[in-house]
Image (spheres, rainbow, N blue to C red):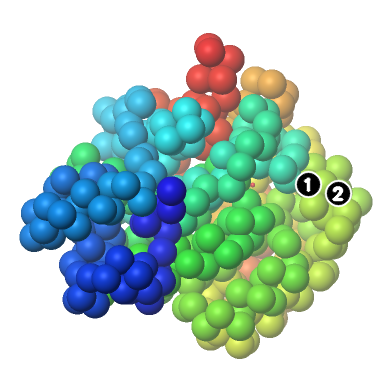
């Protein structure tokens, strides 16, 4: 059985030809799969019954099913725990902003990166998400809330550049006029810094915003909290971001999760300002979400404000991330972990 929803339009057209059907059928099926996001051939009402039966025999549409859903009473943020065709779980969050709805999606079932503060690695790495499952998170969420989702961030469970081919194919699919028609300028890809893949991404000519999860200004500290740094250090990762910004003319931003007593000192802020000097970028300061198993503590309010102040004083644009959905534990990784423990 072939996952029909992970095929590009040209691949789908080849399949339709193989079935001896006219080529225009491919576009019709494509629209059902990618524009409307249906999960069964039975719903494709303008396709003949005979063809629908043939499709059912040879292809499947991997479904992304809502297992749990939480709506924040504070700001309307919606958090989903999705079940996949093989019984695995991933999470996504839909946030409301003035400019529309943004979805934060997962890219893998679990994660291999092993960052010390993050919940996503706790339940172990299982597999990459299929192209259809990356997109299915958008379809299922959009059809459930009944409103268009216009912005996407790849910041849920998993490392997007560790599922590179599927993520790139997914980006092209959501950008298609006959699909979700999402502007790639409204997509943000967050990476822990798989440097060769950042260079590969430049070559794809996709105008997505890149975000590097930096979290420390030097190799000694960063390697302690992010094992990936042992492969590609701070300077290499920031260097790749500089090239990305130059070559794509897209803004690059940096995530910096502040962990009390670990990376929130004035020295760290000064060192970070030095590393980013002359780089037109943006630093997002995120108070660490305390994951019990990880034992990390939030920075004090003072440390947070001072960190931002020091960056700004040295010409680095920095904001403190507004917390959305704090009453529903909206940060990713924790629901899947709990579900695994329950089972
Ligand atoms: N693997 C990608 C994307 C997923 S993580 C990446 O590393 O960027 C999304 C962001 O959430 C990253 O910046 C990550 O470092 C951050 N994050 C993970 N756990 C966190 C926690 N407990 N508190 C605050 N931020 C966290």
Q: Would you say 319 lies left or right of 43 here? A: right
Task: Tell me if mark 1 has few (under 14), some (14-19) or many (20+) residues whose alpha carbon lies within 10 angstroms of its own.
Answer: many
Q: Is residue 270 left or right of residue 88?
A: right
The quarter of the picture where residue 35 lies is: bottom left
Which residue occupies 73% across, 45% down? 113
Measure the C-alpha gap from mark 1 to mark 2. 5 Å
In this view, the residue in front, 273 or 211, is 211
Residue at the disc numbered 1? 226
Location of residue 263 with respect to 339 vertically, above or below: below
Instruction: Return the residue at label 2.
Output: 223
| Label 2 lies in ligand 1 vicinity (Cβ under 8 Å) | no
For residue 283, side relative to residue 295 (left or right): left
Give the image location of residue 156, x and y in percent: 51, 45
Residue 89 visible (yes or no): no
> Residue at 28% across / 53% down in the picture?
55
Nearest the eye: 18 or 170: 18
* Residue furthest front in the image: 20
Give residue 190's position: percent from left, percent from top. 57, 58
Tell me the SS state at disc 1. loop
Query: Residue at position x 73%, y 62% from top?
Result: 194
**Percent coordinates x, y for residue 49 in the rendering:** 12, 52
- Mark 2 falls on what kind of element? helix
- Between 153 and 142, the one nearer to me in the picture: 142
Ligand 1 lies under 8 Å from the Cβ of mark 1: yes
User: Can residue 86 be seen at all in this image of the molecule?
Assistant: yes
**Residue 314 at x, y percent in the picture:** 69, 69
Residue in view at x 26 percent, y 65 percent: 30
Q: Are marks 1 and 2 in contact (CB under 8 Å)?
A: yes
Q: Residues within 10 Å of mark 2 (few under 14, many from 20)?
A: some
Nearer the observer, 292 or 54: 54
Ligand 1's quadrant is: top right
């Amino acid at each position: 059985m072939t996952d029909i929803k992970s095929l590009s339009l040209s691949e789908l057209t080849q399949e339709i030809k193989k079935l001896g059907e006219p080529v225009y059928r491919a576009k019709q099926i494509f629209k059902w799969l990618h524009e409307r996001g249906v999960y069964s051939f039975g719903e494709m009402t303008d396709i003949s019954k005979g063809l629908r039966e043939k499709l059912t025999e040879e292809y499947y549409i991997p479904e992304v099913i809502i297992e749990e859903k939480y709506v924040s009473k504070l700001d309307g943020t919606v958090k989903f725990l999705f079940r996949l065709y093989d019984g695995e779980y991933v999470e996504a969050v839909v946030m409301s902003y003035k400019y529309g709805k943004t979805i934060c999606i997962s890219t893998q079932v679990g994660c291999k990166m092993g960052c010390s503060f993050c919940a996503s690695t706790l339940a172990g790495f299982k597999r990459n998400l299929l192209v259809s499952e990356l997109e299915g998170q958008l379809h299922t969420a959009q059809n459930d809330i009944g409103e268009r989702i216009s912005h996407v961030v790849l910041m849920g469970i998993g490392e997007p550049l560790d599922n590179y081919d599927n993520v790139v194919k997914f980006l092209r699919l959501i950008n298609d006029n006959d699909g979700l028609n999402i502007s790639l300028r409204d997509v943000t890809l967050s990476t822990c810094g798989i440097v060769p893949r950042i260079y590969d991404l430049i070559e794809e000519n996709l105008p997505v915003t890149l975000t590097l999860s930096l979290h420390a200004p030097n190799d000694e500290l960063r390697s302690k909290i992010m094992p990936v740094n042992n492969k590609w250090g701070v300077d290499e990762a920031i260097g790749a971001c500089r090239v990305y910004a130059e070559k794509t003319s897209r803004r690059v931003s940096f995530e910096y999760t502040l962990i009390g007593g670990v990376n929130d000192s004035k020295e760290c802020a000064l060192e970070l300002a030095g590393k980013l000097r002359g780089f037109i970028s943006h630093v997002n300061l995120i108070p660490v979400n305390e994951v019990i198993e990880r034992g990390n503590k939030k920075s004090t309010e003072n440390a947070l404000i001072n960190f931002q102040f020091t960056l700004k004083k040295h010409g680095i644009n920095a904001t403190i991330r507004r917390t959305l959905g704090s009453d529903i534990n909206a940060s990713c990784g924790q629901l899947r972990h709990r579900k695994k423990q329950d089972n």
